[in-house]
Image (spheres, rainbow, N blue to C red):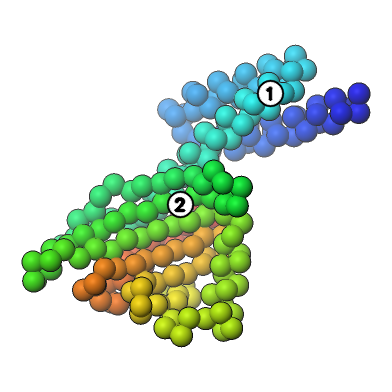
Amino acid sequence: MTFIRYSSRFSAAVLVCVLSAGLAVDVTQADELSDQIERALDAYRDKDYGGAMRRLDVAIALLRQKKAEVVADLLPEPLSGWNAGDAQHSIAATPLMAGGITASRTYTRRGENGQDTSVKITLMTDSPLLQSVSILLANPVFADPQSKVMIVAGQKVYYNADDNALQAVVADRALVVVDGSSGVDQSTLKEYFGAIDFEALGKYLR
């Protein structure tokens, strides 16, 4: 009986959290989410706590999918003279990444020599590993000798010459990586880094 009382309280608490989070989902995209929440509520009222939890798992997965779409929308449009493919996003299913969200977009341009050059921007959020990454980047003991610290768009950024990449951890909750192919200069990487809407990213991370 003790387990049943615990399950009841736990289910109610999770239902409140999911319902609150669900309010941020666009109405046009909320039907499936709302359906799962309603079914979870019905199961909860019937004291089918296992069924309620399963429905909540589906609802939470739908919310994570929505969050991944929001992160992908934060990726900037291509700079003048560049082209870009569609933004890609994924949700990590492994326990180590614990639902971390990754979004990326690749930008290309034909160089003067006729060769294509590319820049890829990757955003990773909601992963428990990010705080560890932030500590490693900031600790000189683990610093790559090829890394250089600079300020770009008001953010502390690490530039690695070997990888031709900029990296920054924002609020210990988002990793931003801008890496370029051979022929992409550092100023172009900085332009793309600066094109990211960090104000919107900051609002997302709150």
Query: Which residue does the image show at 40% across and 77% down from the upper left?
Result: 159
Q: Is residue 86 left or right of residue 116?
A: right
Residue 83 or 196: which is nearer the viewer?
83
Which of marks 1 and 2 precedes in the sequence? Answer: 1
Residue contact at pointers 2 and 1, CB within 8 angstroms = no
Residue 113 or 79: which is nearer the viewer?
113
What is the quadrant of the C terminus in the image?
bottom right
> SS at mark 1?
helix
Q: Does 25 appear above or below 167? A: above
Q: Position of residue 152 (x, y in %)?
A: 40, 75
Residue 197 or 94: which is nearer the viewer?
94
Q: Amino acid at mark 1?
A: Ala
Q: Is residue 74 left or right of residue 112?
A: right
Residue on which the image places disc 2 = 102
Query: Which residue does the image show at 84% across and 31% down from the upper left?
Result: 6
Q: Position of residue 93 (x, y in %)?
A: 54, 43
In the picture, the disc for residue 52 is 1
User: Which residue ends up furthest to the top in the rendered image?
Assistant: 46
- Asked where in the image residue 34 lies, by quadrant, the reply is top right
Query: Which residue does the image show at 63% across and 29% down from the upper left?
Result: 56
